[in-house]
Each structure stands twice: as C-alpha cells, then as structure tokens.
Amino acid sequence: MIDFKKILKEHGIPLSLQRIKILEYLHNFKTHPTADMIYQALIEEMPMLSKTTVYNTLKTFTEKGILTALSIFENEVRYEYNTVPHIHFKCVKCNKIYDISKTYDCLKNEELEGHKVLEHHINLKGICKSCRDSEE
Amino acid sequence: MIDFKKILKEHGIPLSLQRIKILEYLHNFKTHPTADMIYQALIEEMPMLSKTTVYNTLKTFTEKGILTALSIFENEVRYEYNTVPHIHFKCVKCNKIYDISKTYDCLKNEELEGHKVLEHHINLKGICKSCRDSEE
DNA sequence: TATCAATTTATAGCGATTACAAACTTGGAA
DNA sequence: TTCCAAGTTTGTAATCGCTATAAATTGATA
C-alpha cells in the first residue's frame, strides 16, 4: 500500500481528503485523464466534490512536480503521474494515448542556436497496434 | 510581391478579401499567432471583420494544407504558415516560440512497439538566447 | 449586369477553466 | 481535548476560446 499522505508531505502540500483521493486516482489509473474525467470518476465516492477543487488540486500538484500536464495534439489538457521519462504516441483512429518507454540520445542537446534547452517533449502520431490488427 | 490570390486558387480556396488579408498576415508575421491575435491585428484595417470569419478561415486553410495548427505547451491553438519541416522551442521566460531548423534522423521510426508512426512533433522548452543575454 | 451559391457577419451558445466569497477542515498551540 | 488561525473546499458566476446558426452580403459565372 502506497502512502499517499507521505508523498504529499514530501512535496510540501498540506493534506486533505480530496488531495489524497485525486493523487490516488492518478497513481492507479494511468490513462492520461482530463480534469473532468477525474471529477466524474470521484464524484460517486465523494458526492460533495467540486470541480473547482479538482482544477485547483491538479494545478497545485503540477506546480509542485507531482504531475505533468500534457498539451498534445488537441486542445485539451491531460494529466499524468510523474514516473520515468517517456514519450507519447496518440492513435489517430481510437484517440488513445500510449506511453512509449524510449529515450533518444540524439536529443540530449544542452544548447541549440544559443537557446538553453531544459526539456524536450516528443509526441508521435499514427495508428496503434490494436487498430492495425483489427484493420486486417 | 507575393500573389496571395494565386496561392488560394492553387489550394482550391475561393477568393475573398478576408481570406487574402488573413493569409497575408500569416505570411508576413511568423509569430505563431492565435486566432484572436490575428483578429486584433486586422480589425483596425477591416473594422467589420468578424471573429467567426477568422476561425472559419483558419480552419479552411489548415484543412487545405496552407497552415499548420500547433497545440504545444499550453491550452491554446497557434497557427503558422507552412514552410520547411522544423521544430519548436518555447522560452519559459518570455513565452516566445522560436522555429528551430533541425531535423532528427533518429526519430525516423516507421514502427514502435507495433504502432505505426506517421508523424512526430518535437517541442523544446528552455531559456532563449535573448533572455539569457539579459540575465548576465 | 443578373443570378445564385458561397462567404461573412452578428448573435447566441457551449465546454473548459478561473475568480470569488462564504463555509468548512486541518494542524498546531493552549 | 479544545480552540483558533490559516488554508482548503464548495457553489456560483464569469471568462475564454471556439462553434452553430441564420440573415445579409459578396463573388464567380453566364
């Protein structure tokens, strides 16, 4: 059993039931959910939950480095629990987002045209394995 | 003088004053503007211009391949006139988006974990040259 | 130049997100 | 354990980016 309270404390975030539940959800379901998906999932268990709380909490978590906010391919923000570095693949048919655990040494630039590179985000687009299989 | 009417015709887009002006703006100012930025820039010259027209026109241009719509880093769509392939660098200090003319052969994967890769988008983040210079 | 389809405009509307103020929790001190 | 201040949550209203719709206008063709 993971101690979510400890994770929050370690990141300097005061505890609350809502924060624990949201963190738990993001840790358990690595589906790159939107704020609304998280809200819909938790409202059954916590009928008084407010959408504002979900947005505030995701903002706090992102600022404190627990989560990463993804703006990939479409005009919607998705969130994921921080783990090892990886890249994202989005299927143009089923719209699922897959994590690909691949690192690219060729991107290890510290500097480019005088700009200092701190992060790089790689987003791939195509047709996923399962859609290709059902295509025949 | 570039013949914007010709460009529109070549892409099968019927002419209109609004379309010519929007295309001209995107060609002349490569600042990756949002729909609203384009609207604000053109409203002085064309006081009757409607925001709906800007959105419709950008959609048409994107579908016809004149423009590319960028969803990078933030929850807003930015547009750019299509030129050679390149990647984007966003400065975390001044928020400017720079075009970097670099291609990565290491990303030329046709397949990855069974998924068929059709496109890749690389977005870099860091501190731009001009912000570094003024930092000292 | 007349016609008619296509485009533009203005308004209303929608979904995602934020602002705000009141009510409620939490954690620490007495 | 009780109380209090600070911080958090809630609900409502508002904002932002974008889309739908229908009437008015424009542009290409005959």
Image (cartoon, coloured by chain):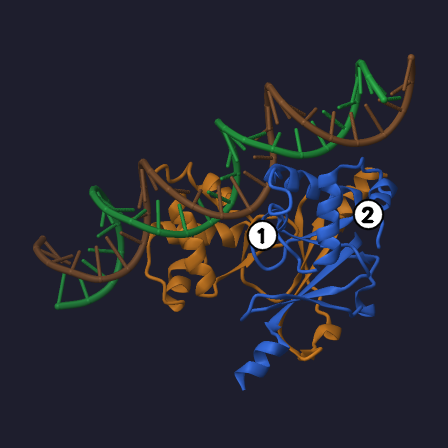
Chain colours: A blue, B orange, C brown, D green
Please tell me which residue lies in front, A52 or B86. A52
Q: Nearer the viewer, residue B31 or A52?
A: A52
Provide the secondary structure element on which disc 2 rests. Answer: helix
Which amino acid type is shown beneath numbered disc 2?
Answer: Phe
In-image side of A26 versus B118 (left or right) = right
* Residue appearing at x 84%, y 46% in the figure: A7
Is A2 on the left-hand or right-hand side of A93? right
In terms of depth relative to the viewer, which is nearer, B82 or A123?
A123
Q: Residue under circle 2?
A: A4
Furthest toward the bottom, the residue is A136
Task: Give the answer, above or below, for where B117 lies relative to C19.
Answer: below
Numbered mark located on residue A76 in the image: 1
User: Which one is in front, D24 or B131?
Assistant: D24
The residue lying at 48 percent from left, 62 percent from top is B66
Disc 2 chain ID: A
Picture coordinates of residue B22 (x, y %)? 44, 50
**Amino acid at pointer 1:** Glu
* Label 2 close to label 1 by CB (< 8 Å): no
Foreground label between 2 and 1: 2
Residue A67 location (% of width, % of height): 75, 50
Residue A126, relative to residue C23: is it above or below? Answer: below
Query: What residue do we see at 53% from left, 71% from top?
Result: A93
Mark 1 belongs to which subunit? A
Q: Secondary structure at mark 1?
A: loop
Q: Residues within 10 Å of mark 1 (few under 14, many from 20)?
A: some
How far apart, in angstroms, are the residues tagged by discs 2 and 1?
A: 27 Å
Residue depicted at 77% across the width and 64% down the height: A86
Where, quadrant-wise, is the N terminus of chain B in this rendering?
bottom left
| Picture coordinates of residue B100, whole percent (x, y) | 69, 59
How many C-alpha atoms fall within 10 Å of the one at disc 2: few (<14), some, or many (≥20)?
Answer: some
